Amino acid sequence: MRRYHVTTFGCQMNAHDSERIKGLLEELGLGEAPSQEQADVIVLNTCTIREKPDTRFAAHMGNAAKAKRDRPGTVVAVGGCYAEAQRERLFALYPDVDVAFGPGTISHLGDWLGAGGEGVARGSFGTGEERTFAARLPVRRERRFQAWVQVSMGCNSVCSYCIVPAVRGRETSRRPGEVLAEIEQLAAEGVREVTLLGQNVNSYGRDLGSSFAELLRACDAVPGIERIRFTSPHPKDFRQDVIAAMAECAAVCEHAHLPLQSGSSRILKAMRRTYSRERYLRLVAELRAAIPDLALTTDIIAGFPGETDADFRETLEVVEEVGYDGAFTFVYSPRAGTEAAAMPDQVPDKLKRERIERLVEVVQRVAAGRNAGRVGMVEEVLVEGPSRTDSGLLRGRTRRNTTVNFSGDAASGELVSVAIEGATSTTLAGMQLALAVA
Ligand code: SAH
Ligand code: SF4
Ligand code: F3S
């Protein structure tokens, strides 16, 4: 049997796309190889959000090129956002690439790999017009009891630093009926937790006369789905109806990932985020008033062009004021073709690094304090497997999306009550009390 190996870079959308790529390849009769070295078809599902994933991809291409020399006949397929961004130059930059595809053209992969018996169509690349939902393809899920569900593709925002709209195109929502049919099917297969995926889930449905709030309520009504998560909501589109749905739907988890990007209204304007520091903080207050136990996490960029020390201090202030339970922090990385890359006053690397270090320090201190506040409480935990740090312990996540390492005997996929006894800035520790849901 011919075998494939998929390496995934980037965000949850890409991780989910990779599940579809695997499903497609298995439908074509390929099996999964344990490593790149043993694969006949090497797939790299790329990201280009910052410079770092581009560099990591280059290193992987070096390995793939070696695999082709060692084992002639090995096929190298490159998909995802970097492939799409470099579609004009990819084959020239990396002559070892046989087949390339973008996030919207996964469904063509089979044809290009020669599934019809014509042999590999070297140098193929679909056009932007052919974009279709990967969600229509077969899927090979990583976990039996958790699933990602794509609700939209593309992004209509124009954040000045971001490459995503250029590579993933305009926003298109999946029909609610299609999303729900998938979730009902997942529930029938034993899935208990779904994460709804879109670049801006809060603008879901506008192109269809539907809304994200309605979708949340419909998902909540699917029997067997105990937890609903979503990522990412854009603060500018987070409306009352979604807040109410979060508060009222039992399955919707008490967690919002609410990207801040910067705490300075001046920088937010240059980023074209279309909210101010004050409006963001008002939204946080509204969310907390409606959902008292809400966990908040965020994304923050340090060193955006023109960011002064005073702007940066405003970001630190907002981190303290909101009290985030966790944050992904990024050094600003200029992306070719974006508005911000051409702005004057690019912040020098050394200063960007200094700022990110200060930011990480504050984020960790604030998150450690938030987690310490959970000690003594009992949390409902969905068991995900053995702990990564101590194989004698189990690992799972609370409804608020915090990882817990705990002693217990539950099986993966079970919901258990865990008494929280300890905390770090990123995890909780505890002891299983009982099965929370039979
Ligand atoms: N659509 C989602 C995710 C976008 S990418 C959202 O809007 O929330 C994830 C994060 O990467 C962004 O939230 C941002 O913080 C970061 N990011 C995007 N472009 C970047 C760049 N050029 N440099 C540094 N960080 C960036
Ligand atoms: Fe990028 Fe902004 Fe769209 Fe998120 S909302 S994908 S940051 S353009
Ligand atoms: Fe995701 Fe990276 Fe593309 S973050 S949308 S895989 S550029």
Image (cartoon, helix red, strand yellow):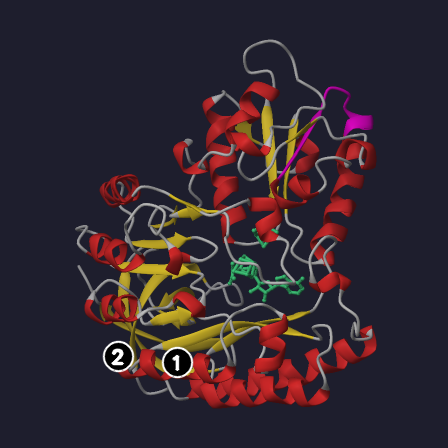
Residue 267: horizontal and vertical position, in percent? 63, 77
Q: Secondary structure at mark 1?
A: helix
In this rendering, position of residue 371 left or right of residue 82: left
Ligand 1 sits in which quadrant?
A: bottom right
Number of marks in the rendered image: 2
Q: Does the image show residue 277?
A: yes
Region in magenta: 68-79
Residue shown at 65% from the left, 40% from the top: 84
Neighbourhood count class around disc 2 (C-alpha, 10 Å): few under 14, some 14–19, many 20 upward: some
Neighbourhood count class around disc 1 (C-alpha, 10 Å): few under 14, some 14–19, many 20 upward: some
Q: Secondary structure at mark 2?
A: helix
Place residue 314 in its image quadrant. bottom right
Residue 54: horizontal and vertical position, in percent? 73, 51
Please tell me whether residue 78 belongs to the stretch shown in magenta: yes
**Kind of residue at disc 1:** Val
Checking the image for residue 290, the label placed there is 2
